[in-house]
Image: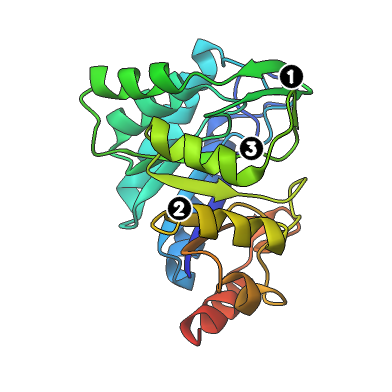
């Protein structure tokens, strides 16, 4: 199971807790370099600390995010991905196109969900069309299925959501636990594999040394953020520890 390491950005401009771009870029690049040194296969950048999140981010966030992503792209050789929270697929794809990123994460690609930021309606046609408009067909869409930190308005089997996301054009599907740091339900993973045997499945939360071997039976990749952190920054020791386990499985 390949590992995608998370770079959680410090708060970007427009929020009271924002400090400075030097600080934002400094920590983001440092975390990315540690992840690369530790041996992860790719890096996903996310504006996690822009709290509360917005459905669509403001121009200053897009400008700052682009600046950070470009700085990371210039320093690391790994593929990078972009996720602009809550579900701003246009910003994600635009930043990815400008910075030479390889993929984007779209938290809500199917369904309608209720979040702390309001009701978010999936727009798969608009996502695919906007990617085509940008001539960005090389940028993969990683779509969350029944995403964490959200409640579906109409609950249905997870395998139906997975099949629909793939049918609508998602390149890979992400399965998460209920909240950040929670691992997915194994039985749900099994159902998705049975329904979508050819799909690339990504664990979106909760991967750690304790469950890596078990989760790797059901997924091709895992996005790891929480486990790698120590006092808010990425720990080289933790990255190397998980990657040593990954190399044995």
Residue in front for this viewpoint, 64 or 209? 209
Colour mapping used in the image: rainbow
What residue is shown with label 2? 43
Q: Earlier along the polypeptide chain: callout 3 or callout 1?
A: 3
Task: Give the residue at mark 3.
Answer: 10
Helix, strand or loop at label 1? It is loop
Q: Quadrant of residue 139?
A: top left
Q: Which residue is mark 1?
A: 117
Residue at horizontal 72 percent and vertical 77 percent from the top: 210
Q: Position of residue 100 (x, y in %)?
A: 28, 38
The reply to whether residue 41 is in sight is: yes
Q: Which is in the foreground here, disc 3 or disc 1?
A: 1
Q: Nearer the viewer, residue 59 or 140?
A: 140
Q: Is residue 49 above or below residue 218?
A: above
Q: How many marks?
A: 3
| Residue at disc 3, secondary structure | loop
Tell me if I can see residue 5 in this picture. no
Dot in front, 2 or 1: 1
Measure how far apart labels 2 and 1 are at the Cα level: 26 Å
The residue mark sitting in front, 3 or 2, is 2
Q: In the figure, 135 relative to 198: above or below? A: above
- Distance, label 3 to label 2, CA atoms, is 16 Å
Residue 233, compared with residue 86, is above or below; it is below
């Amino acid at each position: 199971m390949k590992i995608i390491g998370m770079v959680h950005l410090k708060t970007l401009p427009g929020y009271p807790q924002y400090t400075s771009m030097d600080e934002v870029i400094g920590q983001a690049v440092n975390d990315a370099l540690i992840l690369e040194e530790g041996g992860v296969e790719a890096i996903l950048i996310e504006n996690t600390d822009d709290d509360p999140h917005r459905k669509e981010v403001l121009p200053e966030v897009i400008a700052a995010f682009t600046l950070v992503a470009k700085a990371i792209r210039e320093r690391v050789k790994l593929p990078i991905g972009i996720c602009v929270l809550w579900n701003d697929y246009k910003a994600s794809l635009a930043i990815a196109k400008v910075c030479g990123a390889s993929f984007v994460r779209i938290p809500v690609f199917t369904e309608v969900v209720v979040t702390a930021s309001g009701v978010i309606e999936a727009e798969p046609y608009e996502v695919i069309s906007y990617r085509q408009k940008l001539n960005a067909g090389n940028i993969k869409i990683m779509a969350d299925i029944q995403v964490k930190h959200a409640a579906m308005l109409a609950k249905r089997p997870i395998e139906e959501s997975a099949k629909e996301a793939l049918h609508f054009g998602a390149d890979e599907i992400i399965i998460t636990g209920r909240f950040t740091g929670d691992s997915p339900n194994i039985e749900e993973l099994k159902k998705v594999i049975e329904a979508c045997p050819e799909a690339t499945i990504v664990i979106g939360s909760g991967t750690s040394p304790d469950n890596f071997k078990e989760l790797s039976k059901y997924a091709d990749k895992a996005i790891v953020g929480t486990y790698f952190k120590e006092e808010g920054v990425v720990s080289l020791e933790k990255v190397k520890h998980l990657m040593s386990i990954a190399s044995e499985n």
